[in-house]
Amino acid sequence: MSDTDQNQNNLVSSPENSPENSQEVVEQLTVSEAITGVFTEPRDTFTTIKFTPKKNYWIVPIIIIIVLNLIASVISSLDPELMKNVMDKQKQKTREQLDEQVKKGAMTKEQADQQYEQAAQFMNPEGSMFKIIAYVGSVVQPFILLFLMSLIYFIVLKILRTTTEFHNILNVVGLSMLISGIGLFISTIISIIMGDMQSVSLSLLFSEESVGSKIYSLITRFDLFSIWFYTVISIGLAKISLTSVTKTSVFVFGIWIIYSVVTSMAF
């Protein structure tokens, strides 16, 4: 741990310096102030959330993210070139995976063809099932990510013997997800312009053909908005658990990197 982080941790965690034991009255943030603060002053914002009465700041951000997701889904569906390119790549990947299973003897050629036909039905952008999955996913996914990530961080913080409450972790993750939500929306606009799925990352400088599908998938995950998102989460978890940003950054970025590498290499 660096001297700066240690001094900051001692400053925040000492009884005489914590807001709840000081003479100064800390006013509770409004939802709009918390949303603004996560972009402008995340340290102060999450410190205030820690030392003020319980409030569910995550609800409004999740609603905003759902709206952004739905708009992005609609915009994407209106671009036939983009959807065709995305689905063609997905079909090719599915075909290759099934062919690999046939080579291993895990299934017959007939079974592989049958599974491919079934999967292809869900990859037709004009099909009703494709649209239902896209729109339902836009609504459900933010909640799944919010509670799953919050639960993982809660368990890790408990293992590290820190003192925090689950609702504050929900607030940290929920507010921070606004960053990734905006990133997804911007990536959608870039994808439409370029005619293929893109993110604000090194993938803008390389093609999938030049580096390979797995490496391309990996560098696509490490985009600027994701780095910003996990940085703010690290800051928020440190503030609500009264520990150092260095410590929270290690497990927050560690989990993200491991997940990204495993999923990129496996699929």
Image (cartoon, grey):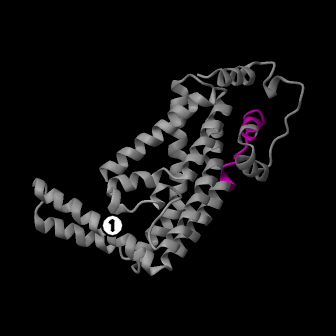
Residue shown at 50% from the left, 45% from the top? 148
Mark 1: few/some/many CA within 10 Å (<14, 14-19, 20+)? some
**Horizontal and vertical percent position of residue 90:** 33, 66
**In which quadrant of the rendered view does residue 27 lie?**
top right
Judge left or right: residue 196 versus residue 246: left
**Horizontal and vertical percent position of residue 243:** 64, 26
Say which of 241 and 254 sits in front. Answer: 254
Residue 50 falls inside the magenta stretch: yes
**Horizontal and vertical percent position of residue 38:** 70, 47
**Residue 253 to residue 260: above or below:** above
* Quadrant in the picture for the N terminus: top right
Judge left or right: residue 230 versus residue 49: left
Secondary structure, mark 1, is helix
Magenta stretch in the rendered image: 45-60
**In which quadrant of the rendered view does residue 98 lie?**
bottom left
Q: What residue type is labelled 1?
A: Gln
Judge left or right: residue 231 versus residue 12: left
**In which quadrant of the rendered view does residue 125 lie?**
bottom left
* Quadrant in the picture for the C terminus: bottom left
Residue 236 falls inside the magenta stretch: no
Residue shown at 35% from the left, 44% from the top? 262
**Horizontal and vertical percent position of residue 263:** 36, 49
Residue shown at 39% from the left, 79% from the top? 127
Residue to which mark 1 is pinned: 90
Residue shown at 17% from the left, 70% from the top? 113
Judge left or right: residue 49 versus residue 98: right
Say which of 58 and 230 sits in front. Answer: 230
